[in-house]
Amino acid sequence: MRELVKKGFFTTSDKARIYYEDRGEGNPILFVPGHMCTTKFYVKNAEELGKTHRIICIDNRGFGSSSKPLHGNDVERHADDIKELIDYLGLKNVMLLGWSLSGSIVVTYAHKYKCHALKGLGLIDACLFPFSPEDWNTYNCKNYDMDAWNKKYLLWHTDIEQYVNNFVSRMDEYLSSEEVQTVKDEIMKTPPWIGFALHSDWIHTDADRLLKDITVPVIIFSGQSLGHGYAMGRHYKKEVRTYCELHEYDKGGHLLFYVEHETFNRQLREFLAKIG
């Protein structure tokens, strides 16, 4: 019998150390956190879904308990990390989900590796091309606005406390004071120089154009918060050529999977049953 939660590290081919947590038994679900976020954000999903599935959560390179390398801080290399983890753990029939920035990472993985070992793909309130000039894009640096990006993210270097407070303000109406402090503690584990590198690559990365090539079923979860609106999820659903579900949340904002975890977990289980 698998122990309740196995915690460990694996070393990538370019010597990054990736932290992961592994619990439960059954078909695997692999959760990839959003920018600067960690395994702790998925606790309400992992604990419940782990009763029926094998749940793997990771800290992306540079985040949380993973090592802080100065190399590989781009979307494609993060996708490579997923491939190496899947092979390291010998996973098959994986349901792979990426939240926020990591939506681009999981889509890039699916495209580059032709859905290797995947059963399905999930996008959790993701923006797949922040620089896009198209109407569906509600991100705040729309239409290649690097000045807007610099104004927002240079604050991370000049006034880190204000930057962290701005980040948390997108979520704090749904969280207790203890949960807010946990969010702050977790995102502070990512050094600004690593966050800059990954985030600046992400805004230039057009993962939206890759959706048409995905060959496994897709589930999309969309909320309403600063920079992320329903228009994104509705656009992605039109682009996907396989079976696809879209679920919209009027509560929870960017943290919908945590705040509305019972609904999220149920919808994910039902999706897996349909494609099983």
Image (cartoon, rainbow, N blue to C red):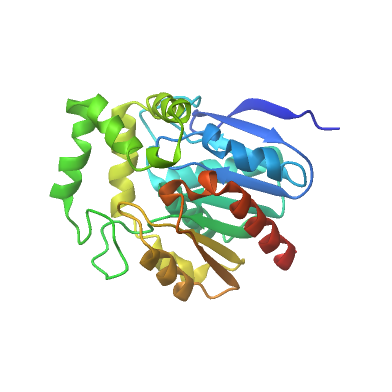
Q: Nearer the viewer, residue 118 or 24?
A: 24
Q: How many marks?
A: 0
Residue 125, x across and y down, in percent: 44, 55
Quarter location, residue 126: bottom left
**Which residue is more in the foreground, 91 or 273?**
273
Rendered position, 192 above or below 223: above
* Identity of the residue drawn at 53% across and 76% down: 241
Residue for point 45% across, 58% down: 250
Q: Is residue 33 above or below residue 228?
A: above
The reply to whether residue 12 is in sight is no
Q: 263 and 65: which one is in front? A: 263
Across and down, in percent, residue 144 comes to 19, 58
Residue 249 makes an appearance in the image: yes
Q: Quadrant of residue 194?
A: top left
Q: Where does residue 149 sit, x and y in percent of width and height?
A: 20, 46
Q: Residue drawn 19% across and 33% down?
A: 155
Asked if residue 199 is positioned above or below residue 12 in the image, the reply reads: below
